[in-house]
């Protein structure tokens, strides 16, 4: 896709997982001069220490290029489950489940991360 193929005025939002692929995609997108309205990151609360150490570095990179970015986190409001969970790991332990990827499925976007983005959008 070229910058000319992005309709004028249409917001372009990238989902950044803090991983290698989405980081490379954002860097390449910006290097090509493509418009980028915002970058959203859904923090599961259970990322590796190295991932959290990289977060401020890439946020600074985005700041230097004037890219709006937000990290959203799931915050439970109603405790339907006990004990209440605040991270993806705690969700799995409380509900005695494994992430869908463990079963060869890819529906993780239907869980806490999408709830987090919905929560942020509603605010």
Image (cartoon, rainbow, N blue to C red):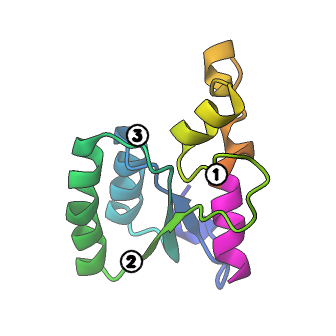
Q: Could you classify mark 2 by the number of other residues whose Cα lies within 10 Å: few (under 14), some (14-19), or many (20 or more)?
A: some
Q: Image quarter for residue 103?
A: top right
Q: Quadrant of the C terminus?
A: bottom right
- Point out the stretch of residues depicted in magenta: 114-123
Q: Residue at x 42, y 43 (%)?
A: 46
Q: Residue at x 69, y 55 (%)?
A: 114
Q: Image quarter for residue 28?
A: bottom left
Give the prevailing secondary structure in the magenta stretch: helix
User: Of 94 and 19, which appears nearest the observer?
Assistant: 94
Residue 112, compared with residue 29, is above or below; it is above
The answer to whether marks 2 and 3 mark residues whose Cβ atoms lie closer than 8 Å is no
- The residue tagged with tag 1: helix, strand or loop? loop
Q: Is residue 115 magenta?
A: yes
Horizontal and vertical percent for residue 72? 52, 67
Nearest to N terminus: mark 2 or mark 3: 3
On residue 21, which mark appears?
3
**Disc 1 versus disc 3: nearer the observer:** 1
The residue furthest right is 80
Q: Could you classify mark 1 by the number of other residues whose Cα lies within 10 Å: few (under 14), some (14-19), or many (20 or more)?
A: some
Residue 31, compared with residue 12, is above or below; it is above
- The residue tagged with tag 2: helix, strand or loop? loop
Q: Is residue 121 magenta?
A: yes
Q: Is residue 56 left or right of residue 86?
A: left
Judging by the rendered image, the residue that carries numbered circle 1 is: 84
Judging by the rendered image, the residue that carries numbered circle 2 is: 67
**Disc 2 versus disc 1: nearer the observer:** 1
Calculate the distance from the C-alpha at mark 2 to the C-alpha at mark 1: 35 Å
Nearest to N terminus: mark 2 or mark 1: 2
Q: Residue at x 20, y 62 (%)?
A: 57
């Amino acid at each position: 896709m070229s910058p000319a193929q992005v309709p004028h005025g249409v917001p372009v939002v990238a989902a950044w997982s803090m991983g290698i692929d989405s980081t490379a995609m954002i860097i390449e997108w910006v290097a090509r001069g493509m418009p980028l309205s915002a970058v959203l990151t859904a923090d599961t609360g259970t990322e590796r220490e190295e991932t959290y150490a990289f977060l401020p570095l890439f946020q600074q990179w985005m700041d230097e290029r004037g890219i709006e970015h937000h990290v959203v986190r799931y915050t439970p409001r109603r405790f339907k489950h006990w004990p209440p969970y605040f991270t993806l790991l705690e969700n799995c332990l409380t509900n005695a489940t494994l992430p869908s990827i463990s079963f060869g499925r890819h529906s993780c976007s239907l869980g806490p991360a999408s709830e987090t983005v919905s929560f942020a959008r509603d605010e």
